[in-house]
Image (spheres, grey):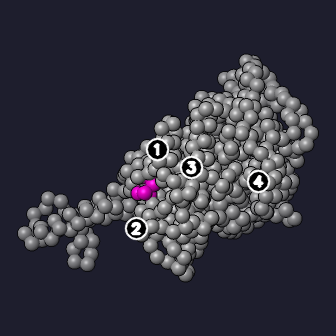
Amino acid sequence: MRSLGKMSKVVVLSLFEFEGSSIVPMRAFAPQAKADGHRRGWVRCSLALLLTALLAPWCAAQSRPTLAPLPPMGWNDWAHYQCDFTAQTILENAHALVRTGLAARGYRTVTIDDCWMLKDRDSHGNLQADPERFPHGMKAVADAVHSLGLKFGIYEDAGSQTCGGFAGSGVPDGGGRDHFLQDAKLFASWGVDYLKLDGCNVYAAKGESQNAAYRAAYRAQSAALHQVARPVIFSESAPAYFQDTTDWYDVLSWVRHYGQLWREGSDIATFDAKAPNAPRFHSVLWNYAYNLPLGRFQSPGNWNDADFLIGGDGGVTLAETRSQMALWSMMSAPLILSSDLNMLSPAAISALSNQAVLSVDQDSLGRMATLLRRTPSSDLLFKELAAGRYAVAVLNRGSAPLRVELHASDLGFEPAGCRFASTDLWSGTREPDALSLQAEIAPHDTAIWKIQPAAACGVPARTGVITRLASGRHRDVEGYALCLASSGDVEACSASEGQRWTVTSSGALESSGRCLAAVDGKVLMQTCGSSDAQRWEYTLLGDLVNRNNHLCLTGHKANGLTVETCGHSPATQIWSLPNDPGYR
């Protein structure tokens, strides 16, 4: 841990004492002159006090229970209502969570998003709830939510103003005092259990990078939450403000030190009351596209947030509702509903509360699915679960029905004749001794199964496609990622055999019986052996570094593969590998 590394220096320092202008080892219990004893005693006490002051916050943080051991679940008003809500809106949806049984399935945190406060603070510098929206104040709403057996969440911003122009917690534009601790204390007094901190209007001082300014703000909010006597789950929006920049992966690497979940990119499409049936599935696919390759940043207690569940709301069909539920669950994403819950159909509620699908999302391993195969119209996903089980899903992005038949070898199991028990999670149909998974999948729908292989099947290989960020262009689902091919190119994903890779235990990348190697500055396929030229180190930022020459695998669509000096997260050097176990 970076923070512990700094503190270890203080621990070492405490074993020494000052003597003149130098530092020498402490000679405990050695006889000293009386004056020297007083001086050394004072220094030791001072160092002990300093050590206690520095380590106390860290020790307290370590002793805290994990706030979000499983992906958070709940409801938020934003994607359906935006700023058009009142206390009554919030409480009607809170009651609907209970009435529909969604709360009993785990959707238990009710969060109010932007626009809840006035634009100015009061004379004491405190935030003020909008009296027209919340005539009885915010604590009354929190108390009412708690009385239903639910948790209560609130929204603020790391900048001087929220995205809607209301009072933010951050440093004012031009510099000055922030309000992170003051606001955290106010939220605790209201009974807040969950804080979503957005990232509009964050001030960067002259000479300070945006990355550094955001990190300072989110670090300050995290520290403030640790000082209040109430556990508050912290949702960070910082990465979303760096999507499409080379700093995106840097931000994704530090948010886990401060909060429990983070939105990485674009907001999901909001409901439009003027066009209530406007299609929104493309937005679901876009958020899925940018979230899926980021499994290396996620681990229990820290979650990649692909944004709200809008299934069942206007512009989302039942098939699309099932797809979002299945895809978010395969990614172990937070499940935060954002719709008018009182308008959901029974079929939509049934899909959103499907216990079997929810158990895939809430699995204790917290793994994100790996992409085994991609065609222009479908994705095959595979996810390791606890207790030797696995989840399998097939997304049909196309406009025609898709017929699939999957065998154990398609999932990475090697032994011929590997059999498994399977359950179709939508229908509940069970097959105790299956050789394959079969389904006909409607357009925009997703099939999902749980399987438990027989002992003879062994452990599946770490296999699937290796993708590279193509351009990151906003909402370009089809062009977002390219596939590494054993031909020596990066190309459109097509499910060809040459796009299927196995990551070996030694760090080799194997496809079609040969291994990727870097020799004399060139990248080529070789007969697999023990050479370091065939070994690749995978970094948190997404680099594939050759162990022999310490250069990064670089994929140019026009010029094929090369190895080059590792840069600051250029798209050509960012890779996503199969079955990544989580952050380093």
Q: Report the disc number at residue 125.
A: none
Residue of label 3: 87
Classify mark 3: residues with Cα within 10 Å, few (<14), some (14-19) or many (20+).
some
Q: Magenta segment, which residues?
A: 184-188
In this picture, is 450 found above or below 279? above
Disc nearer the start of the sequence (4/1): 1
Observer-nearest of 70 and 508: 70
Mark nearer the viewer, 3 or 1: 3
Disc nearer the start of the sequence (4/3): 3
What's the residue at 34%, 61% (across, down)? Answer: 54
Q: Report the disc number at residue 124.
A: 2
Residue of label 4: 272
Q: Amino acid at mark 1?
A: Asp
What's the residue at 31%, 65% (across, down)? Answer: 13
Observer-nearest of 266 and 332: 266
Kindly give the residue lying farthest to the right in the view shown: 400
340 relative to 485 in the view: left or right:
left
Disc 4 to disc 3, how far (Cα)? 21 Å
Residue 517 visible:
no
Disc 2 to disc 1, how far (Cα)? 24 Å
Q: Report the disc number at residue 143.
A: 1
Mark nearer the viewer, 4 or 3: 3
Disc nearer the start of the sequence (3/2): 3
Q: Are marks 4 and 1 in contact (CB under 8 Å)?
A: no
208 relative to 295 in the view: left or right:
left
x, y percent for residue 231 = 44, 48
What's the residue at 48%, 62% (across, down)? Answer: 127
In this picture, is 424 found above or below 31? above
- Quadrant of res 441: top right
Disc 3 to disc 2, how far (Cα)? 24 Å
